[in-house]
Image (cartoon, rainbow, N blue to C red):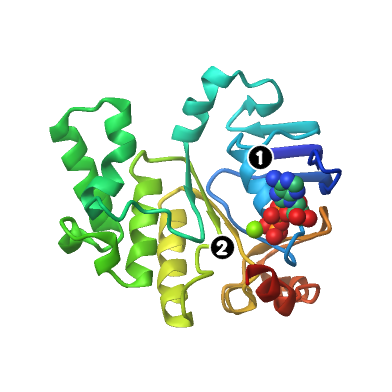
Amino acid sequence: MIQLYHVYKRYPNGIEALQDVNLRIAEGEFVFLTGPSGSGKTTLVKILLAYERASSGQVLVNGRNLAVLRASSIPYLRRNIGVVWQDFKLLDTRSVFDNVAISLEILGLRPKEIARRVNQTLETVGLEKYAASRPLQLSGGEQQRVAIARALVNEPSILLADEPTGNLDPDLSVEIMNLLLDLQQKGTTVVVATHDRFLLERYSRRTLLLNRGYLVEDSSGDSALPATTLLDEDDEERARR
Ligand SMILES: Nc1ncnc2c1ncn2[C@@H]1O[C@H](COP(=O)(O)OP(=O)(O)O)[C@@H](O)[C@H]1O
Ligand SMILES: [Mg+2]
């Protein structure tokens, strides 16, 4: 479960990236986090992973209070949260198998157990045939599925995806979204940060809308459409260039 109480994030340069954010995401929920470029989506994702710390307020993830989390506990937190970024961050010199295996190697699991888990996870994302390939030999959608496999191999209870379809065309976006929805069906809590109207409109799901750091709307699936009205796609495009 994820809970935020009166969370503020002010960066050292004075930018208020999050302001008085209150929210609760239950175990097993699927939630879109949306809002224009610079509204604080990535900051929120980073706070949940303890890459950034809230300036004030409380953040609870699976019962852990991140405000008082010791540095030595951060690896345990991250083991339980899978994360997928927009740019897949794959290692091009390693095989697909090795990219997925890294976190298990760090954990010191036996090679046999690593192989079992990696192969099973590659099957989940439909890439079992590509275990020996290099990431660059794959399409964008396949590379993103490798990134999802890497996020899943630890069997996290929460999966965070920050603009997971940002570099993909609509067909591949649908493929990735269907995979993320499957994972939710199997019990994983899934939070997808996206400014992609196409996704928000096609998949009507609970949508948290950020604007200038404020959570301005929390709509359930059936009324998800109004949440897109504040989005400024051109803005986001400009920011990306
Ligand atoms: N490390 C940082 N240092 C200073 N300002 C930052 C940093 N990261 C993000 N920001 C600022 O915080 C605001 C929110 O950014 P971000 O969370 O990346 O928004 P989004 O993901 O919705 O585009 C923006 O104004 C951005 O410029
Ligand atoms: Mg972002």
Give the residue at mark 2.
163
Q: Residue at x 66, y 37 (%)?
A: 52
Give the residue at mark 1.
47
Quarter residue 193 falls in: bottom right
Relative to residue 172, is residue 20 depicted above or below?
Answer: above
Q: Amino acid at mark 2?
A: Glu
Please tell me whether mark 2 sits on a helix, a strand or a loop. Answer: loop
Relative to residue 231, is residue 123 depicted above or below?
Answer: above
Q: Residue at x 33, y 57 (%)?
A: 146
Q: Nearer the viewer, residue 50 or 13?
A: 13
Q: Amino acid at mark 1?
A: Ile
Where residue 101 appears, x then y in whole percent?
Answer: 27, 42
Where residue 136 appears, x then y in whole percent?
Answer: 29, 65
Visible residue check, residue 62: yes
Check disc 1: other Cα within 10 Å, few if <14, some if 14-19, many if 20+: some
Q: Is residue 131 left or right of residue 187?
A: left
Visible residue check, residue 40: no
Q: Measure the C-alpha gap from mark 2 to mark 1.
A: 16 Å
Q: Quadrant of the N terminus?
A: top right
Compare marks 2 and 1 and give the one earlier in the sequence: 1
Mark 1 close to ligand 1, CB under 8 Å? no
Relative to residue 176, is residue 162 depicted above or below?
Answer: above
Q: Is residue 142 left or right of residue 14?
A: left
Residue furthest to the left? 112
Q: Is residue 90 left or right of residue 42?
A: left
Where residue 207 appears, x then y in whole percent?
Answer: 69, 63
